[in-house]
Amino acid sequence: MLTVRDHGRGISPEALQRLKEEGTAGGVGLAGMIERLREIGGNLEINSSVDGTEIVVRVPARNRVPAELGVLPLPAQEVNG
């Protein structure tokens, strides 16, 4: 799971509704990401308000690396800037 959040102006409710219903919102960026994620069994969730936008991406884990190989999952980090 990956969450990206900004503190901008948000996506207008009209554009967000068009994206959910028609797969378009004035560009191909988010629509393309949604389609690519569906192809691999994942999904993209968009939460937006006047305080900013949050995008949550979920991708199914298929192969996990055993912990004994020394590769451990990284904790979630918040990046500001």
Image (tube, helix red, strand yellow):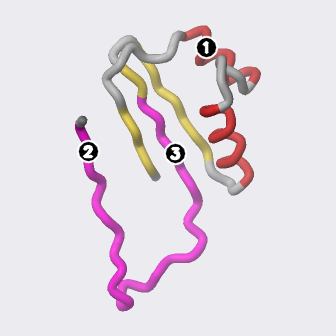
Residue occupying image coordinates x 26% and y 43%: 79
Residue 78: give its label: 2
Magenta stretch bounds: 54-80
Asked if the stretch drawn in magenta spans residue 27, the answer is no
Report the magenta stretch's main SS: loop
User: Is residue 4 found left or right of 22 in the rendered image?
Assistant: left
Residue occupying image coordinates x 66% and y 17%: 26
The quadrant holding residue 44 is top right
Amino acid carrying mark 2 in the image: Glu
Along the line of sight, which residue is nearer the eye, 65 or 26?
26
Q: How many marks?
A: 3
The quadrant holding residue 9 is top left
Location of mark 3 (residue)? 57
For mark 2, give the secondary structure. Answer: loop
Along the line of sight, which residue is nearer the eye, 58 or 8?
8
Q: Are marks 2 and 1 in contact (CB under 8 Å)?
A: no
User: How crowded is the residue under tag 3: few (<14 C-alpha within 10 Å), some, or many (20+)?
Assistant: some
